[in-house]
Image (cartoon, rainbow, N blue to C red):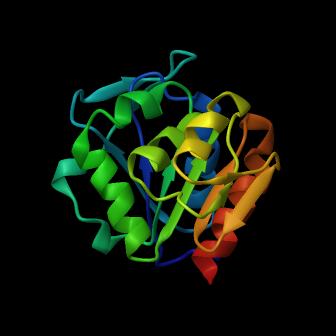
Amino acid sequence: MELKGKKVIILVEQMYNDLEFWYPYYRLKEAGAQVVVVGSGSSEEYTGKSGLPCKADTSAGQISGAAFDGVIIPGGYAPDHMRRHPSMVKLVKDLFEAGKVVAAICHAGWMLASAEIVNGRTVTSFFSIKDDLVHTGANWVDQEVVVDKKLITSRKPEDLPAFTRAIIAALQS
């Protein structure tokens, strides 16, 4: 198990992209990581865009990023809901500043912008939020996956295999 002993957060909020949540969730568990689902605390259960429910293990205000090796932020409309909760934004910023893995796919770039962690970094995202990232100082590129130190970004569900491979590689280093 290549990630035995690793502890990773996956964030959740209403209208999360089901594939972008469940694919990395199960892949990291399969690799031996302990995956903790963290919500905003606005609900006990969150519903994905396709209607799949997800129950959070805890809320962002109840944990410290210091106990974790990284965080995964799925897309969908969830990142717009996530960034309305300062505790979620702070958690992402704290993990980034501690040099931990921060991985965002699709619209999750909104959380990176709100956490103010993309200035001078090379990232990708769903094309419609390119301007949001560029305006916060990011160098945006259209690639399947971009790894800028421990910041990992991807564009869309079709990129999930490359995205998840990059996360696993970063957690191993």
Q: Quadrant of residue 98?
A: bottom left
Relative image position of residue 140 (x, y in whole percent): 71, 49
Position of residue 170 measured from the top left corner of the image (x, y, whole percent):
63, 74
**Residue lying at the far left of the rendered structure:** 62
Q: In this rendering, would 57 be left or right of 114? A: left
Q: Is residue 53 something that shows in the picture?
A: yes
* Residue under the image location 57 percent in, 49 percent down: 104
Out of 77 and 54, give the one closest to the viewer. 77
Q: In this rendered view, identify the residue nearer to me: 130 or 125.
A: 130
Q: Residue at x 23, y 48 (%)?
A: 87
Tell me residue 1's x, y (percent). Answer: 63, 75
132 up-or-down from 53: above or below: below
Report whether 34 appears left or right of 157.
Answer: left
Of the 4 image quadrants, the one containing the C terminus is bottom right
Does residue 142 sit above or below 29 in this rendering?
above
Residue that sits furthest to the bottom in the current view: 173
Q: Position of residue 81 (x, y in %)?
A: 37, 28
Is residue 1 something one can see in this rendering? no
Give the residue at x 76% y 54%: 145
119 sits left or right of 68 in the view:
right
What is the number of callouts on the image?
0
Q: Quadrant of residue 97?
A: bottom left
Q: Residue at x 54, y 18 (%)?
A: 49
| Nearer to the camera, 42 or 123 | 123
Q: Is residue 129 above or below residue 138?
A: above
Q: Is residue 139 above or below residue 114?
A: below
